[in-house]
């Protein structure tokens, strides 16, 4: 099992850097095994990529969605998942912006469905906040887009500007966002 985990970890790292253009020879070299050993765990490169994506989907969607009753928890949960990891950021950017041609369309559809479910949860929380009089009357759609744009902007900033520790700013950034959408300015 340890070898399989190392193979998947190496493929994850290589996919993050190169997309699906990495070779199984590179995976084998990184793990310190012969290429033929990979086939005892995975039928082919496409199956390896598929398993790597499924594994990361579980981490990204299920761990964060466990506690989805609070906007701040979701905001910080998504950011904490990436935890200043350029590898995770590049993995998801490559997967979503430049999906491998060989990827199972059903797998991409699952990713999009889970992303939509998360978006719907956030939109519902915003709607509830508006109904409760906590959040200013505004378009739920626009506030939801602002919420996710802020997250993705922060994540892109990590790739572009390489800040030493952007995480130290997350609470203040959250408070500024919350201040901008709430009626009562108490944080």
Image: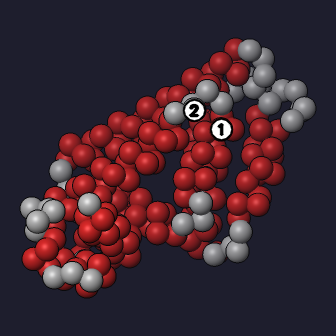
Q: Is residue 122 visible?
A: no
Q: Are marks 2 and 1 in contact (CB under 8 Å)?
A: yes
Q: Position of residue 183 (x, y in %)?
A: 84, 26
Q: Which residue is mark 1?
A: 73
Q: How many marks?
A: 2
Q: Which residue is mark 2?
A: 67
Judged from the image, the secondary structure of the residue bearing numbered disc 2 is loop
Which residue is depicted at the point 38% across and 76% down? 17
Relative depth, front residue between 44 and 108: 44
The image quadrant where one finds the N terminus is: bottom left
Q: Residues within 10 Å of mark 2 (few under 14, many from 20)?
A: few
Q: Where, by quadrant of the figure, is residue 148 drawn?
A: top right
Which residue is depicted at the point 75% across and 46% down? 174
Which residue is depicted at the point 76% across and 26% down? 136
Which residue is depicted at the point 70% across and 14% down? 131
Q: Position of residue 151 (x, y in %)?
A: 61, 51
Q: Is residue 45 visible?
A: yes
Measured Cα–Cα span from mark 2 to mark 1: 7 Å
Give the left or right position of residue 178, taking residue 162 as reference.
Answer: right
Judged from the image, the secondary structure of the residue bearing numbered disc 1 is helix
Q: Closer to the N terminus: mark 2 or mark 1?
A: 2
Q: Residue furthest top?
A: 131
Q: Where, by quadrant of the figure, is residue 38 drawn?
A: bottom left
Q: Identify whether 112 is placed above or below 140.
A: below
Q: Identify whether 160 is placed above or below 93.
A: below
């Amino acid at each position: 099992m340890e070898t399989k985990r190392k193979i998947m970890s190496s493929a994850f790292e290589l996919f993050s850097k190169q997309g699906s253009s990495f070779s199984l020879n590179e995976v084998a070299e990184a793990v310190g095994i012969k290429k033929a050993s990979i086939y005892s765990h995975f039928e082919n490169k496409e199956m390896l990529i598929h398993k790597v994506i499924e594994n990361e989907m579980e981490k990204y969607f299920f761990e964060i969605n466990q506690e989805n009753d609070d906007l701040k928890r979701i905001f910080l949960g998504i950011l904490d998942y990436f935890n200043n990891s350029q590898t995770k950021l590049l993995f998801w950017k490559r997967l979503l912006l430049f999906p491998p041609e060989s990827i199972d369309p059903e797998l991409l559809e699952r990713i999009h469905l889970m992303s939509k479910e998360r978006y719907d949860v956030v939109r519902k929380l915003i709607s509830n906040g508006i109904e409760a009089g906590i959040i200013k009357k505004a378009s739920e759609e626009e506030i939801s887009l602002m919420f996710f744009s802020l997250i993705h902007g922060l994540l892109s900033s990590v790739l572009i500007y390489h800040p030493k520790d952007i995480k130290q700013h997350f609470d203040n950034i959250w408070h500024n966002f919350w201040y901008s959408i709430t009626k009562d300015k108490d944080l």
